[in-house]
Each structure stands twice: as C-alpha cells, then as structure tokens.
Amino acid sequence: METHDQKIQKAFDWLSKENGENFLTSNEHCPTRDIFQARLDRMSREMESVESLRDIFPLVSAITGEIGNNSFDHNLGNWRDEKGVYFSYDLDQRFIVLADRGQGVLATLKRVKPELQTEQEAIKVAFTEIVSGRAPESRGNGLKFVESSVRKYGLKVYFYSGDGMVVVNNGLHEGDDTRSLRGVLAILEV
Amino acid sequence: MRIEIKKFGDILTSRPAGKEAYLSARAYILPKESSEEIILDFEGVKVLSPSWGDEFITKIEQDFSGKVSFEHTDNISVKATLDILKQSSAL
C-alpha cells in the first residue's frame, strides 16, 4: 500500500512528466467526470462509515467535488495530453490528493482578468474573489467555498498551480514549497 | 410546492448533474406560475456542493424570485453551500 508521501509524490511525478499518458493506474486515474463522480460517491460512503469522519464527511466530499469538478469544468477539450484527474485518498491517514494536467489557474483566469501576471496572483484571486474563467457563465464560487469551509472547520489544503502555491487553513498563506509543476495539484488534509 | 431534493440523489456535487436536475424539475415538477411559493426540502441530503446548487437552487430562485424558502438545512454541506450562494448574490 502506498504511503501518504508516495501518493503525493506520484501526483508531482505525473505533472512533471513530458507526457502524462500511461503513468497512472486505472484505480487512481479518472479520465472522465462520470468516473470521478462515481469514485467520489464511493469515498463519501466510505467516510460516512468511519466514526471519526461522520460529522465532517459532507463538507470533505463537497470540497473534493468542487476541486475535482473544476478540473473538468476548465479543461474540457483543452488537456495537455492525458485528460482527467488523479484522485487518490487514504481515510486512515486522513488525506485526499487531486491533480490534473490542465492549463492551470493563471491561464484559466487570464481570459477574464488579463492584468493577472503570475500563478500566485491567480491562485489568490481564485480563492478570494467571485470570478470564473468561464465567462459569460455566472460561476466562480467553488474555491471560495473551499477556503471558507477549510477555515471554519479546521481542515487544511495545499494548493499548487504551475509555480504558485498556497496553504489554506486558518487563512490563505503563501506556501514555501518551491516545486513547480504543469497543471493543478491539491492535497486536502482532514 | 415542496420539492424533496433527496429525490435527485443524496450526494449532489457536480454542475452537469445540477443542470440536469433543474431541467427535469422545470419539465415535470415546478409549477408554471412563478407566483407560487417553493419550498426546497433538504431532508436526507448527505452532500451538497455549490456547483450543483448553483445550477439548481440559483436557477429556481431566478424563476421564482422571492418565493423560495429552505427546510432541513442542518447538514453542514447544505448550510455551507447556501451561505456561499447567498454571498455571491445568487440567492
């Protein structure tokens, strides 16, 4: 069984590869939204059966759903190569990892906020402002929901996009992890 | 009219699923008259996310402006989703 560090390293390795095809196993790769949704439902029911997670599991599932569905919402038809998300979790170690080889937050938001220059700026905007790259649709509250829920219920999210990184717990903090990747990676600690 | 949200599922997280639920409700459940009171009843819902809510709840609020109320919102994901939809002025 893979450890916490191995599951996270696998996400970094996937996003660092020149070509992301044929790297993930079928158990951890969700190439379509339907497959992601089915696995999210299964994780939710597993969490519900764990006594220590029973109170918080609705929020953890909703947060996971928002981050994972963002990958499909913003990269449909625009993946670099391997489509879909890496979705792995361990309820005993109480963490969830999500990653995609998509265009990242800056490229997504720059179409509606052209003044954005860096991934770090774009991530902060994504977590703090109601703004969406999918204009003219009215969207953009998903990561605000993640930020407010994590802060309120004592969870923790490490969120990477390109060379940007934030840690969300009791607020939004600039991270000190200098690893750069191509795509988006999120680690939720419950 | 009371709409039991659990009839659309008890884990409600994706935008396409919310959109499909709204279109189905429009066709077969919601009244034609926009003056009717609508109660969205969340009893039995285990997980609700803003993406699903934005496609279903926000659309119904737009169709029945000021006539929509909520019941059984104790679940923390239901509460948090309604809060964020209110903050984004969707409700």
Image: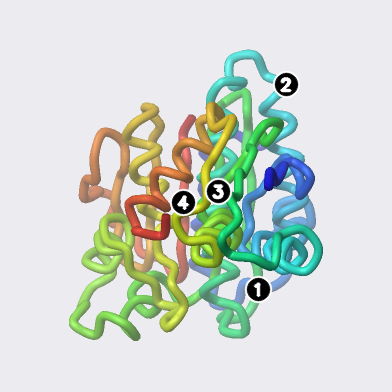
Q: CA distance from mark 3 to mark 4?
A: 17 Å
Q: CA distance from mark 2 to mark 1?
A: 31 Å
Q: Amino acid at mark 2?
A: Ser
Q: Which numbered disc covers residue A31?
A: none
Judge whether residue A31 can be spotted in this image. no
Label 3 element class: loop
> Which of the two discs, 2 and 1, sits closer to the camera?
2
Query: To which quarter of the image does residue A60 belong?
Result: top right
Chain ID, mark 2 = A
Query: To which quarter of the image does residue B57 belong?
Result: bottom right
Q: Amino acid at mark 4?
A: Ala
Q: Amino acid at mark 3?
A: Ser
Question: Do tag 4 and tag 2 residues touch (Cβ < 8 Å)?
Answer: no
Residue on which disc 2 sits: A49
Disc 4 or 1, which lies upstream in sequence?
1
Chain ID, mark 1 = A
Chain ID, mark 3 = B
> Which of the two discs, 3 and 4, sits closer to the camera?
3
Residue on which disc 3 sits: B49
Q: Is residue A29 above or below residue B46?
A: below
Residue on which disc 4 sits: A186
Q: How many marks?
A: 4
* Frontmost residue, B17 versus A120: B17
